Image (cartoon, rainbow, N blue to C red):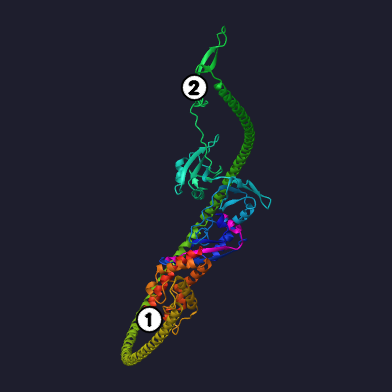
Amino acid sequence: MAAHLKKSVWFIPNIPSSTTASDVLRAFHQVSETGWDIDVSVRPYRKRAGSANDTLNRFFARVKFKCPGAVLTEKALVTMHQQISIPGSDTLVAFSVNPESAPFPSQGGIPRLVKGLPQGYTAGQLYDLLRPKTSVASIRIHVDFTSVWFHKEEDIVESVPLENGGKLMFQAYDPLVLFCGGLAHGTDETMLRNALIDCEGIKDISLRRKKGRGLPFAFVSFETADQAFIAKKKLHGTTVNSKKISVQYSNKEYKEVPVKEQKRTDGGKEAELPPSPEVPIANVQQTPTTPDAGACTKHIVIDGKVSDQWVEIWKNEADTSKAQLVEARRRAVAVEEQLQLLKAEKDQKLAEIQHLKEQNLKLKEVQEDNAKLQVEINDLKRRLELSESRKKILEMQADAPMWQEAKKKREAAEKKAEAERKRKAELEESKRKVREIQEAEARRKKAEEAAKKKEQERKEREQREEQKRKKEAEARRKQEEEAAKKREQERKEREEREEQERKQEKARREQAWQEATIKERARLKRRAHSLWGLRQWSNTRALERVQILMDEFEKTKFSESQPATFEIIPWPVLTDPLLLKVEHIDWAGVEEFFAMARAELTVAEYKKTVEKLHKMFHPDRWRARAILKTVFDEDLSHTLEEAGNTVSQAMTPLWRASKAL
């Protein structure tokens, strides 16, 4: 990779056809808004012979770093390579040294989480901050976290100060293992697997509980870092077993192997250590210490001899047990202090709870008094409403005879008025119906008369229009026939004149071309005889002939008066020009000529000759100079084109090979 960093031109292969140079520049500015002294261009892949048509739809970006050295190239590799997308597409920025070659491999290393990164800090700013202090392999800024990958252990830094007085901290983590916290009681491995059903690459799920609290948590390991990153985005903040969980990276060292806790199967007692295979198995015997006391002392006897090796092992075990006892006592004191603090906190909480209970009792008493007052108010309102109702009833009973009499008079007057209204309405309705019938009859008769008149006028008008149309159509038909006959006659006469003129012009041009071709071929044969026909033909003279004809062929402007001939073309073959024919121009003959030229010329002269002949015989060059258009003989033109293509195809690998010289 160090050699690649020193190159000033990189490529981004296989980008969408809609991507522009501005899009690629925006990708660089996402990493760092300033400091990129580069030129960017987007180009299509060049179509090769025999390749598919869709080659034209493939594009690549060319990035030229103007700053010398590896300053910008290293920054681009660390902050952008296979990490960010080109704006407007899903294509990742992947650098390579050639449009056709594979991209650089991804940067590996030792990962660290970045803590305390200011909001809006870009990968380019973080690189500029770290590069003077250490070597960085990759910087990856995600939505919810940022990671830095160092090349080696020696490159890792614990913290870096910021310009605003803050400090960046670098925390170890395992990119392949996720820590799932906040799990609900009763959560099991099946529930976690169901939550991770859309995630790939799961290697192991380890469900555990914290001592003393019984809260479950889990470690989930994956095959690749990308799979773990995708699972973190999907699972963080989701609900598992009716509770939202938190998913973060495990803060263990990368590639650390967790040691599982061994279960006790002996009821809480210390398990007996198995005998070491390096220590011989010993038998315990009792030997009297004094002849008269009868007391016995236990010794370790191996093959009839007392051994102190087991005594030393037991001493070491005793020292270890003593140290563990001291540590256990220290922990007990710490736990006791913690219990005292918890007890004081508990007493304080109980006092607060008691105070709240007293306030609650007072509140309940106030609420009961308010309820009693509300009941009394509602009772008084109900009594007042009853009094008002009784008053209204008494008033209505007193006025009953008067309003009953008034009601009878009003009903009688209303009945009389209603009968009069109905009689008048019936009379008006009768008159209206009679008028409508009379008006309808008059309208019908008038409409029938108008319809008859319109129908008569329509028929007369249609007859007149039909007669007029027939006369006009007949006149137009006769005029069109006469005009068509006249146009056809004029067209035939014009085509005959044009055809005659074309034939005359073609005959004249062919005659002029034949005369010019005969004259040019005679000139070239005379010159070939004078230059190369007097002495014996050799490879050196063949090379000399090609060099002379190259300059003349390149300077000649071919036209109808100066047509291209077989003799004027500098065919790169070793055959005598006086005996040279089209059949002698083949792939093997071209390779034989250049093998001779490689031996006769210097490297610079050989490369210059190959470069010049490669351009001279390129089909696009011949088309641009319209060489074959000056040859009127189609068979000769086709023969020259095939021979030129043969030389061009044979020279392409020779030209590429000359680039490496």
Give the side of residue 54 with respect to residue 24, left or right.
left
Can you give x and y, in whole percent of width and height, for residue 616 in the image?
A: 47, 73
Q: Residue furthest front?
A: 535
Could you tell me which secondary element the residue under label 1 belongs to?
A: loop
N-terminal-most mark, 2 or 1:
2
Secondary structure state at the residue bearing disc 2: loop
Q: Quadrant of residue 322?
A: top right
Give the spatial CA distance, label 2 vs label 1. Answer: 110 Å
Image disc number at residue 595 = none
Is 232 left or right of 492, judged from the image as shown? right
Q: Give percent across and percent down for residue 512.
A: 41, 87
- Is 402 above or below relative to 189? below
The image shows residue 598 at horizontal and vertical percentages of 48, 66
| Foreground of the two, 596 or 638 | 596
Q: Position of 305 compared to 170: left or right?
A: left
Residue 406 in the image: above or below residue 450? above
Labels 2 and 1 touching (C-beta < 8 A): no
The residue where tag 1 is placed is 633
Three-letter code, disc 2: Ile
* Image: magenta residue range: 54-78
What residue did someone put label 2 on? 281
Is residue 119 shown in magenta?
A: no
| Above-or-below relation of 469 to 113 | below
Give the percent coordinates (x, y) of residue 530.
Answer: 45, 80
Res 167 seen here: no
Between 306 and 452, the one nearer to me in the picture: 306
Q: Residues within 10 Å of mark 2 (few under 14, many from 20)?
A: few
What is the count of numbered marks? 2
Q: In the image shown, does 36 or 310 lie closer to the viewer?
A: 310
Identify which residue, 172 or 613, lies in the foreground. 613
Q: Is residue 77 magenta?
A: yes
Q: Is residue 421 above or below residue 365?
A: below
